[in-house]
Amino acid sequence: METLTDTAKATILLCTPLALKDKTAKPYAPAEWHRLGKAIVGSSIGNPGELFHQSAEDLCRKLFVREEEAARIETLLSRGVDLAIALDDLARQGIFVVTKSDAAYPRRLKTLLKTQVPPVLYYGGDLSLAETRGIAVVGSRNIDAEGERYARELVTSAVQTGLTIYSGGAHGIDEIAAGEALKHGGSTVAVLADSMVRKIRQKAVREAVAGGKMLLLSAVLPQARFTVGSAMGRNKYVYALSQASCVIASDKRKGGTWAGAEESLKHHLVPVFVWDTDRYPGNRPLLELGATPIPEAMVWEDMLSGASAASIPAAEELSMFAQESLPDAEAPTEAVQQVSAPAKAEPQKCPPEPSTADGAPPDIFHAVWPFLRRALAEHDRVDEIVASFKGHLVKKQVTQWLEEAVEQGIVKKTMRPVSYHLVDA
């Protein structure tokens, strides 16, 4: 089994239910992880791998979170041994994990999905296939003979041009597209919404994965059952991985095919092409929403001209969190199997955290502001303010918060030298 960095290990522990026995501790959803990650990067902790060395009190003081949130983090991080066993079991079945902090994580997902990118992906096969140029071929499960013929013809044309076929790995169009790609010596990536464990056991799939022609990807547990929510979430990953999408058959204003195409059109993820036919009720309504008819002469270079790979940064240019930078990538130092679960700390009192009028959790600036205001009552220079936090915050983050306070009109900034003053002081 591959060695994981502490940052990758922390991401898996905090963002997945893998080997989680305490059901009261809820793993972080993508948007939650994005917010927490920004707080970690902006604090003296620096990166998620350092969370293993923090007490509950440290988490409260450095991240400005409540005691309940610190306890949640501690509980999720405490199952290191169980996680190692679970990962080893998956590896024996040919299933591995990649996290948002890893250079091998698919770049298009990071770039296009921003805060909604899944922090952890499970995969089986050659992960580099997710970086190859290709098209998404999508459609409903219920497809007639003419639709199947058209899908096979389209996939054959794309594969002969050297394109990879991306699909959702479900019955119907997904399986037809993947099978046709493999039949003609092409490659395919299937983004699953349910059990990868079951999928990878299928003989044809296992052989294609072993031959480097098929990649299975999923943001849900490898043992997960199908849910409509997982299927809907999976759709945007299929679109984002491809350079363009081709809709063969869609229902009208319902179903995963319609939802995926509509979302891609709305957010301009990738060009959306639709078979111009009245055989399926949703195809022409999608064209009315702005999709492009699939041309009779499928000249793929022309069709993909609006989705240049040049817009996707190189792996080393992508940070772990959108618009944020991390310290140098952590070198793999220790196997997960060798890391025991940290000792459970005694409950500790944390600094009080403000809340909004309706009781909803405040954003990080509003959580920090009372402490920042207290520091501004005694200091006006950035270095002095940073020093007053006794190493728990870094200058870059304090400066950003001060500038936000200036924008809100609660702090005044003066130049030569640069200093900050409370407006109501």
Image: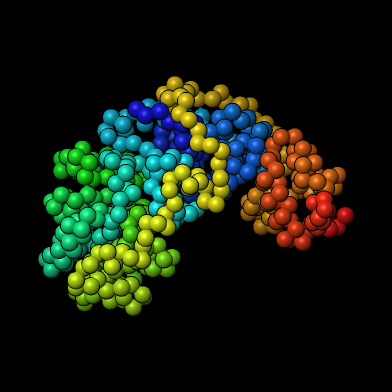
Where's residue 365, x and y in %?
68, 51
| Residue appearing at x 28%, y 76% in the figure | 284
Q: Give the colour scheme of this rendering.
A: rainbow
Name the quadrant containing residue 205.
top left
Q: Camera-side residue: 382 or 345?
A: 382
Q: Is residue 54 above or below residue 319?
A: above
Q: Is residue 320 visible?
A: yes
Where's residue 24, x and y in %?
50, 39
| Residue appearing at x 55%, y 30% in the figure | 52
The quarter of the rendered structure image containing the C terminus is: bottom right
| Residue appearing at x 42%, y 41% in the figure | 103
Q: Is residue 402 above or below residue 206?
A: below
Where's residue 328, x and y in %?
53, 37
| Residue appearing at x 77%, y 45% in the figure | 382
Q: Is residue 66 visible?
A: no
Where's residue 80, x and y in %?
46, 28
User: In this view, which residue lies farthest toward the right?
Assistant: 425
Q: Is residue 75 above or below residue 224?
A: above
Name the quadrant containing residue 261.
bottom left
Name the quadrant containing residue 389.
top right
